[in-house]
């Protein structure tokens, strides 16, 4: 078994240290609430894209900064970006944001960054390159492209985890996954074992998939809502990205290459 496969399995087992004494609490109710936030109809595409998000490393090419028509920011975003810039939250909101174009009932307290359609984000700097506030960028910027609503709809409609055209970070990640696939093809039965792993209902896999979905909700909605769900489950905290990445590699590979892996050795 490859080093990366062993590493992923070991990382999933280590997640058990997050479990409260006696196991998870109120899981059925929490999972129903999670489904109201993101329907199970979007699985495995939601969790699959969450895995890709954890694995991809933004290359700061500036494409998102230039092409997004509008950029929504939450109050939490405003607070974080203001602190990063050394401004008060009030001053940041006055100078850099404007009211949202949608009604408050639909978007709550969210606002929009001040930019005209066709213009880049005000924090885009081609000399850096890319985002001037990258460590503190808005939640919607963290979620793009994998966990954008448009990408999730497209994945569900076409029933596959879609590549992101023109995104250098996605291209690099796809090559990494392809190399992982090539390594597995040299191991007899590795493809079948990888496919079987995520339908096995093993405790460590079951917990990993739950924590990955929670991480996806954190990326999609922001930390507060996901943290409340974690507390209701009795978890001391959400899993950190580093704790999920090794398992995410196995999961992403199983979704993108699983079927072809099973027959790869037979076709040679």
Image (cartoon, grey):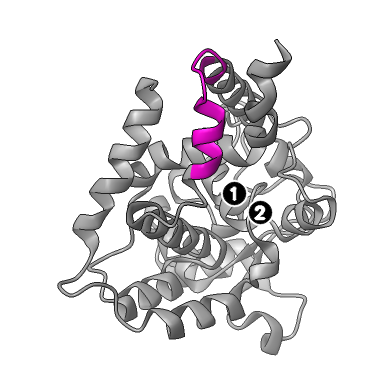
Asked whether residue 186 is drawn in magenta, I would say yes
- Kindly identify the residue that appears in the image at 61 percent across and 35 percent down: 125
Residue 208: horizontal and vertical position, in percent? 39, 54
Secondary element type, mark 2: helix
Camera-side residue of 71 and 207: 207
Neighbor class of circle 1 (other Cα within 10 Å; few <14, some 14-19, many 20+) is: many
- Kindly identify the residue that appears in the image at 48 percent across and 36 percent down: 250
- Report which quarter residue 39 is drawn in: bottom right
- Quarter that holds the N terminus: top left
Neighbor class of circle 2 (other Cα within 10 Å; few <14, some 14-19, many 20+) is: many
Camera-side residue of 199 and 42: 199
Q: Which mark is residue 192?
A: none
Q: Which mark is residue 48?
A: 1
Q: Which residue in the protein does label 2 denote?
A: 45
Residue 9: horizontal and vertical position, in percent? 34, 39
Magenta part of the chain? 183-196
Vertical side of 156 occupied by 163: above or below: above
């Amino acid at each position: 078994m490859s080093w990366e496969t062993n590493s992923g399995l070991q990382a999933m087992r280590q997640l058990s240290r997050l479990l409260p004494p006696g196991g998870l609490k109120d899981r059925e109710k929490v999972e129903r609430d999670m489904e109201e936030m993101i329907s199970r109809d979007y699985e495995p595409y939601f969790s699959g894209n969450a895995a890709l998000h954890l694995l991809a490393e933004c290359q700061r090419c500036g494409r998102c900064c230039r092409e997004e028509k509008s950029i929504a920011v939450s109050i939490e975003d405003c607070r974080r970006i203001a602190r990063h810039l050394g401004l008060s939250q009030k001053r940041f909101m006055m100078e850099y944001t404007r009211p949202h174009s949608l009604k408050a009932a639909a978007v709550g307290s969210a606002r929009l960054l001040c930019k005209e359609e066709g213009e880049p984000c005000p924090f885009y700097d081609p000399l850096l390159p890319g985002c001037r506030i990258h460590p503190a960028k808005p939640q919607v910027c963290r979620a793009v492209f994998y966990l954008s609503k448009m990408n999730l709809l497209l994945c569900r409609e076409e029933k596959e985890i879609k590549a992101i055209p023109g995104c250098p970070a996605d291209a690099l990640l796809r090559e990494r996954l392809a190399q992982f696939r090539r390594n597995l093809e040299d191991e007899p039965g590795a493809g079948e074992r990888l496919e079987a792993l995520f339908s096995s209902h093993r405790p460590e896999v079951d917990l990993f998939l739950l924590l990955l979905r929670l991480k996806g909700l954190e990326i999609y909605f922001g930390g507060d809502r996901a943290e409340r769900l974690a507390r209701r489950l009795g978890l001391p905290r959400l899993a950190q990205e580093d704790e999920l990445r090794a398992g995410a590699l196995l999961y992403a590979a199983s979704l993108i290459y699983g079927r072809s892996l099973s027959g790869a050795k037979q076709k040679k």
